[in-house]
Amino acid sequence: MHFSDLALNLHLENRRGGEESNRDGKKQRSMNRNREHVTCAHAEEMEVMMMKAFPHIRVSGTAVERGRQLGQLAKQQIDQNIEMYRQYFRDVYDVSWDDAREYAVPYIPWIEQYDQEIMDEIKGMSEGANLDLLDLVVLNVRSEVIINIGKTHAVLDGCTCLAATPAVTKEGTTLLGQNWDWNHLIAPGMIIAEIEQPPKPTILMVTEAGIVGKIGMNSAGLGLCMNFLGTSELTEGGVPIHVVLRGILNSHTLPKAISQITKLPRGTSANYMIGHKEGETVDVEATPTDYDVIYPLDGSMAHANHFIAPRFLAVDDTKRAVIPDTQLRQGVATRLLAAERGTIDGETFKRIFINHTGHPAGICRHGEALPFESDVPGTAKTVFSIIMNVAEGTFELTYGTPCDHAYETYRLS
């Protein structure tokens, strides 16, 4: 079986009977319980599945030392990710690994200009994992490879982010969260990285092993979620978005975090949802050469995979055109947040994250084929769901779809 077959064989066996007619959280949980208890053997299998977790790796020291530790401790996952993307680029985007390595070379000076320590950490990972540096650089520019030189393949997009400030939360805290949707074959290559790096804040994040920045929080009380966006503006340089994500997580304050997005051109378009324990949240939409900041005046907001900032209303929004569910997901999430204004808590987020409206292209995604569209064999799958309380320095995380997997709690050491 070719990788393209595997990549698009997105677990049809997970399809749940009658799901289209049972969308609210209570019915979904009841349905899951019924499925789990069909037989003792199946119940035991479900229990094992629900207790899976990503490896939690802690590192410290200089940038190179941290990278070496990550490379050594996560070598298996890094190797898996390189092989996964090698085949994924080839089979889905018609891009060879050699082409990706050549394309990645010009990004090295951009990373060095942005933050030399980040580049040093990447070098350290290559040494610790005993891999060529360019292989690690490719992982960190994998989004730029896909967007700028790969063929369009929109069905593997679908992240949905949420934020709520003390003005609307039950306990007066700042909450952030998202369902991160991507090719389900990346799951064995995911890790939880805890990075101690004084004087910069300690980071606790969920990331693809080998990639320096992703989704998580830091000891300064700052949390970060993200969505991929798309425009027709293609680039051959700029700061890779995963490096930008690390720059944000390296920040103590919201102004510093915003400056980490805006200080240099970026490799591709993305949305950055950032919250702080002080009680404020901002959302930054950015193309390679422009940006806009959205402030949630009503205290909460949701974001999917299309531009919503006034500055970008006329932009050539490629995601809006090819992923119609992005607008539905955003609308559903926004409505459900508004319905619980003043009482929003982690359970609110969980109810939203298990919502299947628009199945199989809903907020909670199972990677199933879109009905009546034979040329679109599958959609993204929710690889993990995360809910952050930035004041407490904790997040709840699932290994897989939140309707089928329990949330486990992690805390900054």
Image (cartoon, rainbow, N blue to C red):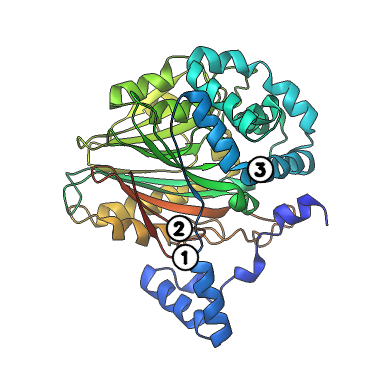
Labelled pair 3, 2 in contact (Cβ < 8 Å): no
Label 1 sits on residue: 405
Who's the residue at 45% across and 58% down the image?
Answer: 398
Instruction: Report the amino acid beneath label 1.
Output: His
x, y percentage for residue 116?
50, 16
Label 3 sits on residue: 81
Q: Quadrant of residue 194?
A: top left
Residue 87 visible in the displayed image = yes
Task: Identify the mark nearer the N-term, 3 or 1.
Answer: 3
Who's the residue at 54% across and 39% down the image?
Answer: 320
Label 2 sits on residue: 398
Query: Which quadrant, please, contains the N terminus?
Result: bottom right
149 or 65, nearer to the observer: 65
Labelled pair 2, 1 in contact (Cβ < 8 Å): yes
Report whether 359 appears left or right of 129: left
Instruction: Report the amino acid beneath label 2.
Output: Thr
> Helix, strand or loop at disc 3?
helix
